[in-house]
Amino acid sequence: MNRPQTILSITFFFSICLMFVSATFAQTDPRYKIEPNYEAVLHVIIGSGEAAQDAGLPQALSNISKQLRTNFAFTSYKLVNTYLGRIANTGNFDYKGIANIYAHEQVTDTPSFLDWRLIDLRSSQSAAGQSIFQMQSFQFGARVPIKTASTQGEDGKTSTTINYEYVGLKLDKISFTENSPTLIGTLSLPKTSGTMFLVLTVKSVGN
């Protein structure tokens, strides 16, 4: 065998070896592991003293309804928004959008702006062997329109001054049971007697 053929054979041999090692490494390296996926559902509930608007909560939130009526004095609880996101184990989820915070018909020129984040969601087990989730951080924020003044011009038309106020919360390292709606925080709404309740549910879904 002449020298060029020998070099070609050696090169081919090492190429095959490299491909084999790479494939083996990919199978054993945890970075290539397919993480399980989960569905995160955030329910936004408004509590108020307006009994006429009490539409009740869905059956899936019956335990939350009992918890709210036991611990808070509002006569009305209404589900105003539901948000859904898909997230893998150890992953993050980030949502930003326009929302109807006040549970009535949205005024298009003064919307509310909402954002919420799940950071580093991880599945685990409790000491009793129950499936639980833990997050490094949960963040929720909303910029809501507040009517601050009304003036009447010379033409008789009324103009309204709208300012935006920010409400939000941040929780670090929280745990909760899988597929169980969990009340994770409350927020007082500016210029109203109402309170916003945040309920989070996370459950397993197919990859």
Image (tube, grey):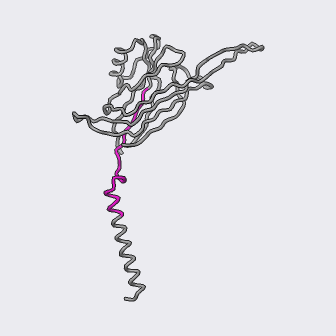
Q: Name which quarter of the figure residue 3 lies in.
A: bottom left
- How many numbered discs, if any? 0
Question: Residue 141 at x, y = what percent?
Answer: 50, 29
- Left or right: 199, with 165 as reference point: left
Residue pushed farthest bottom? 2
Q: Nearer the viewer, residue 200 or 81?
A: 200
Q: Is residue 175 magenta?
A: no
Report whether 102 appears left or right of 41: right
Name the residue at the front extreme: 172
Residue at the spot 40% in from the left edge and 11% down from the top edge: 73
Q: Quadrant of residue 121?
A: top left
**Residue 23 magenta-drawn?**
yes
- Which stretch appears magenta? 22-43
Residue at point 40% right, 17% down?
56
Q: Residue 120: x percent and y percent? A: 39, 40
Image quadrant holding the C terminus, namely top left
Q: Quadrant of the N terminus?
A: bottom left
Looking at the picture, how far across and down is residue 68, in whole percent?
A: 37, 17
What residue is shown at x 37% (from left), y 80% (from top)? Answer: 9
In the image, residue 126 sits, relative to residue 3, either above or below, namely above
- In the rendered image, the residue lying farthest to the right is 154
Q: Between residue 20 and residue 61, name the one nearer to us.
A: 20
- Give how far across and how far down residue 75 sits, in percent: 42, 11
Q: In the rendered view, would you say 154 is above or below 116?
A: above
